[in-house]
Amino acid sequence: QSALTQPPSASGTPGQRVTIPCFGSRSNIGSNTVTWYQQLPGTAPKVLIYNDNQRPSGVSDRFSGSKSDTSASLAISGLQSEDEADYYCAAWDDSPNGVLFGGGTKLTVL
Amino acid sequence: QVQLVQSGAEVKKPGASVDVSCKASGYTFTHYYIHWVRQAPGQGLEWMGWVRPTSGLTNLAQQFQGRVTMVRDTSTDTAYMQLSSLTFHDTAVYYCARGTMGAIDYWGQGTLVTVSS
C-alpha cells in the first residue's frame, strides 16, 4: 500500500494561515479517522489532531483539522516561528490492517 | 502520565540482528496495542507492525514479514522488537508507540540503530 500523499514542503510568514493537504483513498482516509503529528528536529512525533478534527489538551487552537471524502487537511493560523517542523498525516488502512503515514511536509516560517 | 521508555542506541554489523525494548507505564498495558515505526535519516515515518498485548497477536507490514518479530511481556509491561538480517538500509530511529486499531497517540523517545561494517 502506498503512503498517503502530502506536499514535501510548505511555507508562510509570521501571522499567516497555512494549509497542508493529505490525500488518500477509500481504504484509509475514506473509511477511517485521520491523525496529524508534529515532529520537531530530533524528537518523537506528537499528536496535533486526532479523529480528523479533535485537538488534545495542550495543543494550541491555532491548529485545526478537517476531512472530506478521501482527503484531509491541517490548517495552522497565526503562524509562528516555533511552528517550523515536519508535519505528518496518518490513517488506518484496511489493508495492511495497519497505519499508513503521509510522506511528511516540512514547514518553513519565512 | 503515559510513558514509553526505549532501550539505548545500537551499532550492528550487516547480517546481524537487533533487539529493541519498550517499557510502558502510566496506563494499563493490555488496553492498548504497541506499534513499531521507523524513520531513516532525513526520511518519513514507516509503520512496521503492531502487537496486541492481551494475546501477543501481531500484524506486520508486508516488507517486514519474515524479518521482524514483535513480542510482549505482560509481567513487566514491556514490548520487544527484533529485526534480523540487517542491511545498511535498516539504519534508522525505531519508535515504539501506543495505539489502537485506528491511531497512534503516545510515542517512545526512539532508539537509533546504526548498521555499519
Image (tube, rainbow, N blue to C red):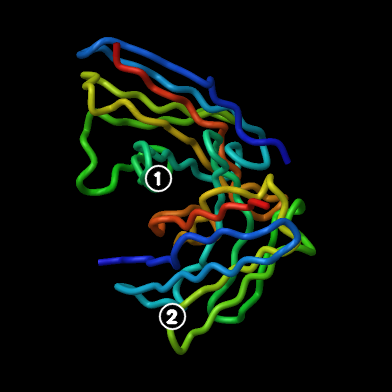
Position of residue A19 relative to residue B99, above or below, is: above
Q: Position of residue B12 (x, y in %)?
A: 62, 60
The residue carrying mark 2 is B77
The one nearer the camera, B67 or A68, is B67
Task: Name the disc covering residue B81, or none.
Answer: none
Q: Residue, x 40% and y 54% (percent of image)?
A: B105
Q: Residue, x 57% and y 32% (percent of image)?
A: A103
Q: Secondary structure at mark 1?
A: loop
Q: Position of residue A109 (x, y in %)?
A: 30, 16
The one nearer the camera, B24 or B57, is B24
The residue carrying mark 1 is A45
Query: Total number of numbered labels?
Result: 2
Q: Secondary structure at mark 2?
A: loop
* Rendered image quadrant of residue A10: top left
Q: For the N terminus of chain B, which image quadrant?
A: bottom left
The one nearer the camera, A91 or A101, is A101
Q: Chain of mark 2?
A: B
Position of residue B57 relative to residue B96, above or below, is: below
* Same subunit, tags 1 and 2: no
Characterize the local packing of mark 2: few (<14), some (14-19) or many (20 or more) Cα atoms within 10 angstroms: some
Q: Chain of mark 1?
A: A
* Rendered image quadrant of residue B50: bottom right
Q: Position of residue B86 (x, y in %)?
A: 71, 57
